[in-house]
Each structure stands twice: as C-alpha cells, then as structure tokens.
Amino acid sequence: MRHSFAARARASVASWNATVVSTLQANPWMHWAFVYAVGHLYYFSYRCLITPELLATFGAKDEHTAEIKLAGVWLGVVEDFIALTCLVVLLWGCDSLLRLLPGPRRAVSILKYALQFVAYLVLFVVFVAPFCADTVLMRTRQLRFTFDWVHTYLNQRDAAHNLQVGAVEVRIAMHALELTLAIAVLFSAIGVLYLDLSHWSPLHAIWKKNATKRSKPTTYIVTTPSSRSNGYVDMERGDEEKSQNTEASHDDATFLTESHTSNAQSLPWRSYVESIVMAGSFLVVLPIIALAIAHNCSPVVANVALNTILNEAFRLWIHTEFLPSLASGDIASASNSLQSPFIHASTENFTLFGEASLYRRTTGFRGPLAFNVSVDPHDPPNVLVIVVESFRARDSAYLVGNSTYLLNGDPNITITPDFDRWARRGIAFSNFWSSYRTSRSLESILFGQIPYDSVTDSGITGGKTDVELAGLPQFFKAKGYETTYMSGCRTDYDQWNKFLPAHGFDEVLARNEVKVLAEKDLGITPAAWLSDKEGGGERRAHSYWGPHDDISFEVLGNILINKTEAQTARVNSGTQKTPFFLTHYTISSHTPFREYPAWWDEYPKPDFTSQYEGRTHAETIRAYLELRYFQNLALGKFLDRMKAQGVLDDTIVVIVGDHGQAPELGLDVVEPDQTSTTHVAAALIAEGRLGDDAGTIVEDAAEQYDLFNTLADIVGLPEGGFIQSGVGRSLKRAVPFGDRIVWSNNPSRKFAAIRGHHRIEYDHVSSEISMYDVETDHFQTRDLYPTLDETEKAGVDAIREAGRQLNMYFKNRWDKKCILAVAC
C-alpha cells in the first residue's frame, strides 16, 4: 500500500510537472509573466506594510486619506513595473548566454543549472534587498534607505558596534531578511526547474510578424501516416532531447501540411525600428513619465510609491530622484521674503561678492551691545572653545531658570553645578540651538554654516581637502594666532584627521597624542587604559573613542599652562605675543553611557532619584545623569585650575554642547525629542573683562553658527576685514527679542526654525508644519500652528520656505565645492 501511494504521488508530480512544462512551451511569455508576478507581489506586500509609517512621516494630518494611499500604490505599481522590467531584461540576458554553453553532457548541464540558480538568486536579491532595507528603516527609524548607508558603514565599520539597536528593531530586521532570502531561494529554484526567459521577448511579436510577411507563398504536401514522424523533438535549453509519441487516429488518411520556405534575406529595416521603439517605450519613455509624475505629485504620494532600487539607480547615475523636487537653493528670493534676512545687516558691515551668495567680506560690527568684553587690540586674548559631548540645556538648573518642570519639579537639583557656577560668572545663553550629530557641529561652530543635509554624511566626511573654507581657524590665523585642535577622542571617524589639518589647524592632538602626553606627564601606565582590572586596567579611556575627560582636561591644562608661560616669556623678552586659538572636544558623555573610569565606581554621587525613578528607561537616564555629572566635575576642576594658574586672566572661553540627548527615550531612537536633542547649553567666560555684564543671560534664540561672528566681534577684525560665507550674527550685539530666526536641522528627523521661543518644524518638501512654544512646552505637545490666522500662517510658511532654500544652498555648495564662490 505504501509503495502504491508513493508511486501515485510520483505519477501526480510527474503529471503536474509535464503540464507546467507543456503550458510554458505553448505560452513562452509566461516565463516573463512569472517574474513580474513574483516581483509585484513582493513589492506590493511590503509597500502596504509601511504605508502607515510613510503617511505619518511624510504626510500632513489631512493627507491620511484613501485617495492618497491609492494614488501612491498606483504610482508605486508603475515604478515597480519599471524596476522589474530591468530585472527581466537582465535575466533574459543571462538565460541567453547560458544557451550558448555546449551540451548535452551531464557535467555541462549541472554547470548551467548552477550558474542559472546563482544568477537568478543574485539578481533577485539585488532588486529586492534595498526595498526590504527601506521597509525595515521606515518601520524602526522612520528613515529611507539609500546606498549611502552602505558607503557610511564601510567607511565607519570600526564604529558600527557603537550603534544602539533595540531588540524590536533586530526582530523586525531578521524577519524581513529571512522572508526575503526564502522568497529569493524559492524564486531561483523555480527558475532552474522551469524558466528560460530566452525563449521569448516582446520583440518576438515584431520579428514574427515581419518574418511572416517576408516568407514565400504556402505550398501543400500530400503525406500519409507512414511518411510522418512518430514524434517530435524539442531541444529544451539546448541540452536535453524530449520526445512524445503520437498515434494517427486514421491510418488510411492523408494529410495536407503547410510548408513555408523562409526568405534568405534579413528582417526588414522597419523591424529594427519597431524593436527600438518598443524597447525605448519600456526602458526610457515610461521611466520619464513616472519621473515627471513623481516630481509633480504630492510628496506623500511620491514617498508611498517610491521603489528604492529604481530611485537609487536614477539618483546615482542620473542625479535625479522619484520624489518631488527639493528647494533650488535660491537664497536671494528666499531672503527677500523675510523681514530678517540670512545676513544680519543691522549689526554687520559687509560687502557681498554676489547677490545670490553668502560669500562676503565682513569689515565690522555695529549696534547697541547685549554685553561687552574688554579687549586691548594690542594685546589680543587667547581663545578656547570647549565643545561638550551631548550637553543639553535642560540639565543646567541655571539655564532652566523657572522652567523647573524640566527637572521634574525639583528646584534644588542641578546635574551640572560646576558649569552653572562658571556660567554665572560669565555670559550664559539659555536659548541656544544646534544641529544634530557631532560632525555637523564642527561645520556650524567653526565655519558659521548650516550643516550639510544628509542622514549618513556631513561636510566633514572624507576630509573635504579639496573644498576651500573660511572660518574661525582662518580668521585667527589672519590675526596671527596659533591654531590647535585637541580631543581625547579619535579623529579618524568621519575623517576629521584629514579635514582639520586641511582647513586651518596648525596642530591636531587626538586620542593617541593625548595618551602619550598622559603617560609622560601624568604617570598613567599603558595598562591603565584597559578595562581588565586584574591586568592593571583602570578604565581611564573609553574602549573605542579614547581617554576620558578627566585625563584629557588634565592634558589640556598642561598645554595651556605651558603656552601661557611661553607667551609671558616672549613678552618679557620684548618679543611680540603669539596668542592661541584652541578647540577642544570632550567624549566621556557619549552614548551608551556605560563607560567611565574605575575610580568613579566609588566616588560619592548626588542623589538623582527624582529624575529617573519610575521612568520607562530609568537605568539609561541614571547612567546619563551620572556621566553628565562626571563630565561636569572634570570641566569644573579644569576651569578652577586654569583660574588658579592665571590662564583665564588672558583667555576667553566658550563652552557649548555639540548636540543634546534624550535618554528618557532610551538608547535606540532619541531624535523624536527634538528639543532635548538640539537645545544645548552654552556660556562665555571672560574673567576680568565683563564688568557689570557678568551674570548676563541672553534669552533670544541663538545657534552654534553665531559663535564665529561673536568671537570676531570680541577680539577684533584683522586689517581689511575677513572673508566668510556663514549665516551667523554677533551675539555681542543687542537685537529686539524674536526679531531674528535661527535654523536647527536634523536630516534624520525634521528641520526647525526658532524665533524667540517659538520652534517651527517642517521637512524637505511636504506640507506638514507645526509650531510650539518650547519655553512652556518643551516636549512639544501643543501645536500652535492651527491657531494662527491666515496672515500669520503665511508668515510661518515663508520661514519654512526660506529654511529649505538656505539648507539646499549649503548642500549644493558643498557638493559642487564652491563654498567660497559667487556662483557654482
């Protein structure tokens, strides 16, 4: 019975197999149709899965409609068809090449099957993997996939382990990967068993039609059953003979058969023309039509429809995308639409080199003072800029002021007592903003720019040694300063090690140099950098980035003391003073907040329980607060030492966060708290130079890119002024509160414009826009935009458009390497 069942099963399989083979032989177009069907089903399923995320990310609330979804899916099917046509053509080419291999030897047949399986598998994965990755990124991070992610990973793979990925994200990614690979393997197996796309193509219809027209007239041959073949031979793939016996139904019957004698001449010229027209329609005309529709439809429709592999091919090869056109970068028209233009003409004297450019020569600053810093032009002070990792404004009780709800209503707590103590002695900025990511802060702080618009890259990436820039390093060198960059952190990340010496820094001291100096001057042993306690490890360095802030500040202090003593000696000997400009980046408070020196384990810490108890991510919040306090202690100890050694008597110090942080959201995705991640702490310390202005708090909106003009206004301009291409203003000058707009962009989330305490959020192209009062509504729960009248909304919309144009202006200038040029 068992053998009988097995036999019947084999017979059923054989019968089904024969039916499939005969059907495909009779309808060779089905080989192509199968590829289209599988591809469309894959794309359609995943597109439907992420449509809610796409609507939430790229659409306004009134765009979450069935019509929008249907339009997006319809356009998506068209884009999918274009992508799948490219896949089918490539598979057809592979099958055509495989037919050229000799046969029918068994070894050759096996090789052909293996090659076909690999070709089908690789090509299918190439066409669906980017779409799969896009789906995963949208579901987990609300980001779109591009091949720039791959490029960034290859460049920064050493730092990949620092990326925080949640368990849910891993599960989503693994499910998508497993499903995609399973479909790819199944598709390839079916291809080996049944498919050969070389048997047919849409052009065959043209060739067949014209070949029929060119054949000679039909003749009829009288045959008998005995003269007919008892079967037929079909060369399948050119390597196997398959025969099927037939029986005559009437032995004595005669048959009339048609005989076509083909003409020896080649196909007529019109066949080639028609073939080119058909191929061009599918491979050129249809993509152009789809591209035109995508450029002119609603952004949310285009994003729902987006086929990632098709879009990436066009983006990389033709430099266009299946998305609505972004801003042009026309800052001339954008500036004219605002009451306050990009260059603050009421406080800056300048000469533009071109109307549609920010490239200018600044010759001075004017206007009433917000504060004054006394500087002898014949004895210029040293300047130190300290950029603190992940230093958000809400951690400082001094900056928070009356908004104690940011400290959970506890008026007696501060996370940064030493920063607060020194900020009270100087000038504090309570409404100071950044653009997210550390590399982007370098562009703003040093060069006064809106940072490069990219999720994966920055203006620093690759070193940009072939781009001419003008910023603080060039400004201070023009005034005769020594320029130094220093950090306990490694600088190979994002190729800072190439960028910094190519753009104005005479000396760059990073992780390795700081370690050498610490071992030489501080008595740190090589083993102390390690985490292995039994091997003498004291965890004095972050395992990836480099020495912790307590060490780097000690080394920095030694350097400043030595420089100051050398300056004094030169002046005493009658030699002109050579001041220094030094930029220092800290690192200890970097995510994931788990690494600190061994001595910190036993150090008595404040009770921060009120800030994290009962919270969802309580342990992450606690770890962040304690590391923030550790960094604060290191900063305070450094400043106290510099004061005691007399360094601060001749040095102006700026302290600013590179960006903020939101441990309350965990470690995986912090950007949704846009205020905490971009509203940073900032203060200026100028011992003995502020007079009655010491203790001033500047409440109007300011941004990292304002530091360039602020420091230039403080220390004085070089003879003839200086060149720049930034958007900052001098914060030393007083302006009416809320008169000026600052821009704070996060490409992985939203763009923002801050005016007074109002924060306006928008993205590249969609109609979505919102406005919040972040002074009273830090967590952005009450959107004020719907409450505005039409005139007020028009004003806010103009700010959004200006921000988009300004953002694209800098992106275009970086891409075309023409930052310092009138036109690109």
Image (tube, rainbow, N blue to C red):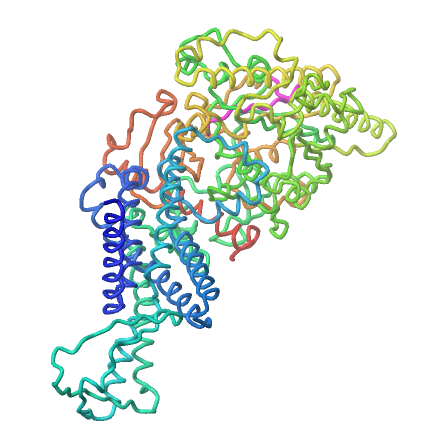
Residue 354 image offset from top left, x and y in percent? 51, 54
- 761 lies above or below 823: above
Q: Nearer the viewer, residue 305 or 64?
A: 305
- 189 lies above or below 517: below
- 689 lies above or below 313: above
Q: Residue at x 72, y 32 (%)?
A: 512
Q: Residue at x 53, y 33 (%)?
A: 704
Q: Which residues are magenta?
A: 678-692
Q: Residue at x 12, y 85 (%)?
A: 252
Q: How many marks?
A: 0
Q: Nearer the viewer, residue 365 or 280?
A: 280
Q: Nearer the viewer, residue 454 or 183?
A: 183
Residue 664 image offset from top left, x and y in percent? 42, 20
Task: Tell me if 192 is positioned left or right of 261 in this view.
Answer: right
Pick out the residue farthest to the right. Answer: 573
Q: Nearer the viewer, residue 334 or 44?
A: 44
Question: Residue 580, located in which quarter of the rendered image?
Answer: top right
Question: Residue 712, located in which quarter of the rendered image?
Answer: top right
Point out the image quarter for the N terminus: top left
Q: Is residue 280 visible?
A: no
Q: Residue at x 66, y 13 (%)?
A: 599
Q: Is residue 446 magenta?
A: no
Residue 270 image offset from top left, x and y in percent? 30, 84
Q: Is residue 180 visible?
A: yes
Residue 449 image offset from top left, x and y in percent? 52, 41
Task: Tell me if 208 is positioned left or right of 134 in this view.
Answer: left
Q: Is residue 683 magenta?
A: yes
